[in-house]
Amino acid sequence: MALDNNQLLRFTTAGSVDDGKSTLIGRLLYDSKSIFEDQLAAIESTSKKKGHDGLDLALFTDGLRDEREQGITIDVAYRYFTTPKRKFIIADTPGHIQYTRNMVTGASTANVATILIDARHGVIEQTKRHAFIASLLQIPHIIVCVNKMDLVDFSEKVFNNIVRQFEEISSKMLITDVRFIPMSALLGDNVVNRSKNMDWYQGAPMLHILETMHISSDINKVDARFPVQTVLRPQSDTHRDYRGYAGRVASGVLRVGDEITVMPSGFTSIIKSIDTFEGEIKEAFAPMSVSITLEDDIDASRGDMIVRSNNKPEASQDIEVMLCWLNNNPAKPRAKYIIKHTSNNQTAMIKEIIYKIDIHTLGRINDDKELGMNDICKVKIRTTKPLMVDSYRENRVTGSIILVDDTTNETVAAGMIV
């Protein structure tokens, strides 16, 4: 099957301190010729000033520190690059334990997680934690980069031992597609180009895997979900009676002539037309932004969801969520928060903390009910009105929520509906 040349792949990098994440990203950008000449010149001169013989590849990402995400102050740096086969967004997340929230933020939209392991140290506690978060966030594909192979004489035995160690921990988690690459980011072995030092490795280098990985099936194509963002009423001479429900298809496929239900009201109708900026189309699928018109004059507004009548999400006010607390201030017992779910905003309350995850052992803590920054826990949430939800495992869009403090407007938590 031919790849879509404009297909976007998002991947996140995670590793312990000094595992070579910055060098790996620098090598990826440098060898794939994704760096502007003026950037290259600036980095060459900085490398000379620092006394390096060659280029210090880590500097490519060190200049990203001001590329902060707006809203919550988190240390996730984003890098964009393109090859003839694909577009990429890299989320570079810190590996320290105190930045669990940053990894959750950077990984929440990723197709692929790349986990770096230092070949000298093998699988460490941090590796287990990164694998756990990747599993929790249901990232479909994982690439384990066994880096610094040059420091262990490119030993196949060392590599195979690390593969065995990682498979042992990942077998206990919900991780399906894992690939292992032995590499040296510093020397460029198996990053963009094949390594001449590791003939025993029969797989492809990292960039080739990223370019050819099949990600179309990562989106749920079965459950048609269309959260309404706004209602279009142009009232112009050409569109006198036009009423279009505009939004982005979260999952599934919607076609003209489909019988649909508007939730939560339960009114049914038939799709009359699907309109885009370029003109009318016969079908829309995720993640397209479209406007849908219906045969009947139904009252639907922002926060409602258009779904197929024979395939509805659950409408519920009581939901169980795996929550990662992002805020410096701890959760207040029975305090009210704004819950954002697709285009729907409601008031909600954390009713109960069922258990917390011990991020060191990955075991459960049942008796600690305090919720502080970086904590991951399973909670029960009660909302003022029903939300149209799917489980996060089935649908990453309609299965995710965020909580916002209504007094400060800060995002305090991100959650995956169980």
Image (cartoon, rainbow, N blue to C red):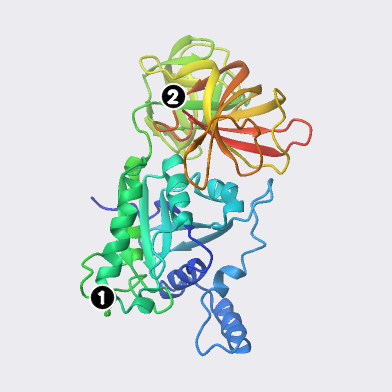
* Position above or below: 272 against 115: above
Which x, y percent locates residue 35? 51, 73
Which residue sits at x=55%, y=20%? 304
Answer with the quarter of the image where residue 127 lies. Answer: bottom left
Residue reaching furthest to the front: 367
Amino acid beneath label 1: Met
Answer with the quarter of the image where residue 253 lies. Answer: top left
* Position above or below: 68 against 388: below
The residue where tag 2 is placed is 273
Q: Which mark is residue 36?
A: none
Label 1 residue SS: loop
**Mark with earlier residue (2, 1):** 1
Label 2 or label 1, whichever lies nearer to me, is 1
Which residue sits at x=43%, y=62%? 116
Q: Which mark is residue 198?
A: 1
Q: Is residue 153 left or right of residue 251?
A: left
Mark 2 surroundings: few (<14), some (14-19) or many (≥20) residues within 10 A: some
Q: Is residue 242 left or right of residue 174?
A: right
Q: Nearer the viewer, residue 361 or 103?
A: 361
Label 2 residue SS: strand
Q: Nearer the viewer, residue 81 or 238?
A: 81
Total number of numbered discs in the rendering? 2
Which x, y percent locates residue 207? 36, 64
Q: Nearer the viewer, residue 92 or 286?
A: 92
Note whether residue 321 is visible.
yes
Mark 1 surroundings: few (<14), some (14-19) or many (≥20) residues within 10 A: some
Q: Is residue 257 left or right of residue 198?
A: right
Amino acid beneath label 2: Ser
Which x, y percent locates residue 189? 34, 75
Residue reaching furthest to the right: 407
Badge 2 vs badge 1, beta-carbon distance below 8 Å: no
Q: Is residue 206 left or right of residue 317?
A: left
